[in-house]
Image: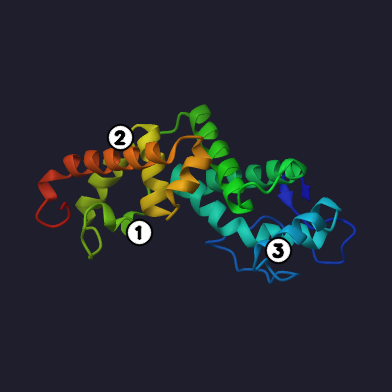
Amino acid sequence: MWVGGMWAPHPTSHSPRLFYRNPFCAPRVASLTVAPASSVDERELIARVRAGDGLAERALYDAHVDRVFRLAYRLAGDDDLAQDFTQETFIRAFERLDSFRGEAALSTWLYTIATTVTLNGLRKLKRRGREIDLDHAAEVAGGARHAEPDLKTRLYAAIDALSEKYRTVFVMHDIEGYTHEEIATALSVEVGTSKAQLSRARAKLREALADFAGDWVS
């Protein structure tokens, strides 16, 4: 459950209190129960959460928090915002878990909530100048080596200049590795739309980085 905006196990459990952690900066706390290894295990875990099992809540949180945080961070480009958006994602997810019908994977359902929370939060804040760690996005340029500092700066600006729909699909697919099917579910678009937007995003980035064509743009 959530206490004062932070994650803590259900009060009926005997486990130590667990506050929200930044997956990149804080040491991982061992799960109190085994993370779900199959859809059957996950369904059982969800049933336990619905029944008020605090250990199951924590296990479900631990199983998904890292990737939810990474998605929020890639879209927001800000550690504090990503933490806030991740907390809000899990608050909403646990509040709405009874409405989860299992038609899609729980991870996809969570990513949908995380994407909505993050994009709506960014729209409200009207943030500019986000920076994304682009060492993970070499695919867009077809090169194997890390970006030079000047190229990184240009690429930051080029991604920030993309429209929201292009930037979101690019970040989710090329940086975070989501499938087009997952993106389509998260953004409520067709798979073909996701593919088309990614293609256009890559084209715009190649155009913006044309003077680096010898090193990065293929």
Residue at 35% in and 59% down: 136
Identify which amino acid the numbered label 1 is placed on: His
Circle 2: element type: helix
* N-term-proximal mark, 2 vs 1: 1
- Verify CB contact (< 8 Å) between mark 3 and mark 1: no
What's the mark number on residue 94? none
The disc labelled 2 sits on which kind of residue?
Ala
What residue is disc 3 on?
40
* Residue indicated by mark 1: 136
Q: Which residue is mark 2?
A: 161
Q: Are marks 3 and 2 in contact (CB under 8 Å)?
A: no
Residue 17 visible in the displayed image: no
Residue 10 screen position, x and y as percent? 83, 56
Residue at the (30%, 45%) spot, across then down: 156
Q: Amino acid at mark 3?
A: Val
Question: What element does badge 3 sit on?
Answer: helix
Residue 187: percent from left, percent from top = 49, 37
Residues at discs 2 and 1 in contact (Cβ within 8 Å): no
Mark before the other along the chain sequence, 3 or 2: 3
**Does 93 sit left or right of 114 as displayed?**
right
Q: Secondary structure at mark 1?
A: helix
Residue projecting furthest to the right: 12
